[in-house]
């Protein structure tokens, strides 16, 4: 466990140079514009989660540029420890993004004199966390299989394809009974929050477990 935490710390050190005041001002400015134009803090939360997803990919880029993966192999460090550390880093980044999104949403709502509903904001953050985690579950194995340079385009296909898939299914099934049932899902979740959360957690754990195993399998096959 100590080695895994060391990898997480190393990843944070890797992305630390990107935590600059310039990037912070850009994040705040973009969030302010989105809040002002849409009037919804969900747009702010989405922007921050996108920034977090970008930061998760930086250790792959830095590691490839500096031959860090080859160094791990030279030191006989188990590859499953490297993979687990990267997944834990992504999880922590998503959690931090959720906290920052909540705080920034509150501040921007106060500045723009808009109502702030903590319950609604928490639901949006949890939903965004769930969606981005699942997308990362598709993305990370691609990076471990191909490396950053070769996977840079393919790894973003889940983020680009997800909205298109949702839009396509909604148009194809807009007149079907399935869409009518799906439209009633938010109401069912509101009436059964515990069951919904448990189902979501089980599904999330299953997806992340499969993703992790694929990443370990792909990473072990690579030569450094």
Image (cartoon, rainbow, N blue to C red):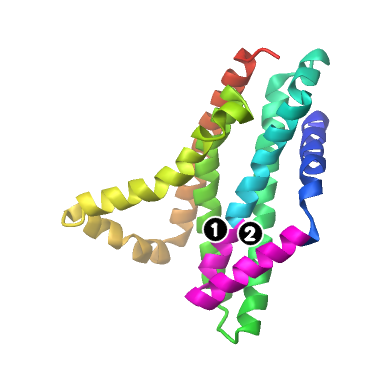
User: In the image, is residue 84 above or below residue 99?
Assistant: above
Q: Main secondary structure of the magenta part?
A: helix
Residue 150: which quarter of the image?
Answer: top right
In the image, residue 17 lies at what x, y percent? Answer: 81, 47
The quarter of the displayed image where residue 220 is located = top right
User: Which residue appears at 68% of the width and 31% of the height?
Assistant: 84
Residue tagged by mark 2? 98
Residue 126 has which mark?
Answer: 1
Q: Is residue 201 above or below residue 127?
A: above
Viewer-nearest residue: 175 or 224: 224
Which span is picked out in magenta? 22-48
Q: Position of residue 81 (x, y in %)?
A: 72, 26
On screen, residue 198 versus residue 30, left or right, reads left
Pinpoint residue 5: horizontal percent, then vertical percent: 79, 36
- Frontmost residue, 93 versus 126: 93
Marks 1 and 2: in contact by CB < 8 Å?
yes
Label 2 CA crowd tier, 10 Å (few <14, some 14–19, many 20+): many
Can residue 103 be seen here?
yes
In the rendered image, the quadrant that contains the N terminus is: top right
Q: Position of residue 128 (x, y in %)?
A: 52, 56
Label 1 residue SS: helix
Question: In percent of the image, x 51 and y 30: which residue is there?
Answer: 210
């Amino acid at each position: 466990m100590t080695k895994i935490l060391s990898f997480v710390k190393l990843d944070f050190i890797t992305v630390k140079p990107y935590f600059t005041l310039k990037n912070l001002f850009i994040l705040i400015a973009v969030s302010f514009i989105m809040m002002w134009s849409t009037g919804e803090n969900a747009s702010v939360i989405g922007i921050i989660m996108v920034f977090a997803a970008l930061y998760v990919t930086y250790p792959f880029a830095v590691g490839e540029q500096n031959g860090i993966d080859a160094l791990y192999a030279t030191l006989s460090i188990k590859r499953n420890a490297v993979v687990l550390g990267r997944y834990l880093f992504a999880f922590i980044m998503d959690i931090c993004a959720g906290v920052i999104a909540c705080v920034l949403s509150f501040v921007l709502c106060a500045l723009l004199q808009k109502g702030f509903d903590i319950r609604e904001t928490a639901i949006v953050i949890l939903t965004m966390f769930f969606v981005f985690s699942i997308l990362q579950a598709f993305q990370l194995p691609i990076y471990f299989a191909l490396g950053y340079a070769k996977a840079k385009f393919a790894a973003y296909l889940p983020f680009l394809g997800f909205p298109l898939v949702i839009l396509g299914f909604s148009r194809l099934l807009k007149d079907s009974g399935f869409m009518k049932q799906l439209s009633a899902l938010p109401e069912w979740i509101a009436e059964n929050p515990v069951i919904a959360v448990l189902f979501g957690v089980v599904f999330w754990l299953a997806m992340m477990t499969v993703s992790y195993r694929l990443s370990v399998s792909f990473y072990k096959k690579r030569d450094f």
